[in-house]
Image (spheres, helix red, strand yellow):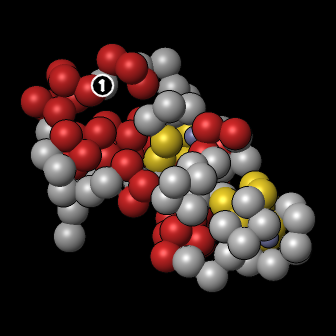
Amino acid sequence: MRPSRPGPAELLQFGERYADLHDRRLADTLILEDAAEEREEISALDRISCHVHRRWVHECISSPTHVIAVTGHRWCRRCEAEASVAVDEVSGSVNVVCTRCGRAPDTAATRQILRTCRASLAAALESRRARAEVCALAA
Ligand SMILES: [Zn+2]
Ligand SMILES: [Zn+2]
């Protein structure tokens, strides 16, 4: 089980990039994943928070930056076309669909996207709930 809060050394090394984020759980996750990635414990594609966009990964997976033809992330090899990711925040469902053939590329990369986006969606919802509780206490 990984710690949910970064330690002082991690904050010092990775915190500045995320100092202005309102969602502190997101900032903590970004810092923890930056640190874990630097220690080579996780790969960039295992992350549930995005270093490039400073967001939960399901929120920016639709950016062209997340299309990686070489690894098959958001990519249908059969069609040589981009796949899009549909995220339903209400039901929590995530789907990857090729923009040409309409099918989900049956690859490890697609399964990784489903896994990380579902986890990031769950983490974002939990963060939102926690912040709503704080606001309710303050009122
Ligand atoms: Zn991103
Ligand atoms: Zn296709």
> In the rendered view, does 17 fall on the left or right side of 103?
left
Is 39 situated left or right of 59 in this image? left
Q: Residues within 10 Å of mark 1 (few under 14, many from 20)?
A: some
As helix, strand or loop, the secondary structure at mark 1 comes to loop
**Rendering coords of residue 124 (x, y %):** 58, 55
Q: Residue furthest bottom?
A: 106
* Residue 36 in view here: yes
Q: Ligand 2 is located in which of the four quadrants?
A: bottom right
- Residue 121: % across, % down: 61, 62
Q: Nearer the viewer, residue 3 or 13?
A: 13
Question: In x, y percent, where is residue 99?
Answer: 86, 61
**Looking at numbered disc 1 in the image, what kind of residue is underneath it?**
Gly
Question: Which quarter of the figure is the N terminus placed in?
Answer: bottom left
Position of 64 with respect to 52 (left or right) is right
Q: Nearer the viewer, residue 84 or 5?
A: 84
Nearer-the-camera pick, 91 or 79: 79
User: Could one spot residue 128 in this view of the protein?
Assistant: no
Residue 30's spot in the image, x, y percent?
39, 40
Residue at 26% across, 57% down:
42
Of the 4 image quadrants, the one containing the C terminus is top right
Residue lying at 49% horizontally and 76% vertically, measured from the top left: 108
How many numbered marks does the figure carry? 1
Q: Quadrant of residue 27?
A: top left
Q: From the viewer's perspective, is residue 129 above or below residue 21?
A: below
- In the rendered image, which residue does mark 1 sit on? 15
Residue drawn 88% across and 73% down?
101
Tell me what residue is drawn at x 31 percent, y 46 percent.
Answer: 33
In the image: residue 63, left or right of residue 53: right
